[in-house]
Image (cartoon, rainbow, N blue to C red):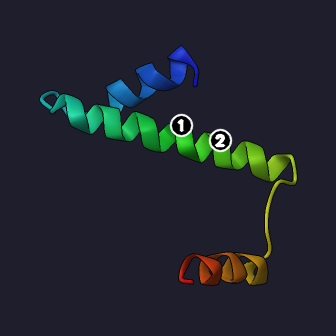
Amino acid sequence: MTKDKVLEAVREMPQEFELEELIERLIFIDKVQKGMKQLDEGKTVSHDQAKNIIKSWQK
């Protein structure tokens, strides 16, 4: 994550906010950025593969 992304997130927050709200937003932004990077790198699974992975968790 870049400092610019953090500052942008802070600017988008209301004047008064809980620190936890900002932390949650930063974590969300970070996870989305990582997911987009994985997508760009072709590190994805198909819908069927995802369904099989989830089924394996239920065993």
The amino acid sitting under disc 2 is Lys
Q: Residue furthest top?
A: 3
What kind of residue is marked 1?
Asp
In this picture, residue 12 sits left or right of residue 55? left
Give the secondary structure at mark 2. helix
- Where 44 falls versus 13 (above or below)? below
Residues 50 and 40: in front is 50
Give x and y (percent) for residue 33: 62, 40
- The residue to which callout 2 is attached is 34
**Which quadrant is the C terminus positioned in?**
bottom right
> Quick check: 54 above or below 32?
below
Where is residue 28 shown, x and y percent of the image?
45, 44
Q: Residue at x 67, y 83 (%)?
A: 51
Residue 10 location (% of width, % of height) = 34, 25
For the point 44% across and 26% down, the residue is 8
Closest to the observer, 42 or 3:
42
Q: Quadrant of residue 49?
A: bottom right
Q: Badge 1 is on which residue?
A: 30
- Residues at badges 2 and 1 in contact (C-beta under 8 Å)? yes
Left or right? Give the position of 13 relative to 36.
left
Image-based side of 4 in relation to 16, left or right: right
Please report the residue visible at 87 percent of the width from the left and 54 percent of the height from the top: 42
Q: Position of residue 30 (x, y in %)?
A: 53, 37
Structural crowding at the residue carrying mark 1, measured as other residues with C-alpha within 10 Å and reported as few (<14), some (14–19) or many (≥20): some
Of all residues, the one furthest to the front in this rendering is 59
**From the viewer's perspective, is residue 12 above or below residue 44?**
above
Neighbour tally class for label 2: few under 14, some 14-19, many 20 plus, Cα within 10 Å = few
C-alpha separation, residue under disc 2 versus residue under disc 1? 6 Å
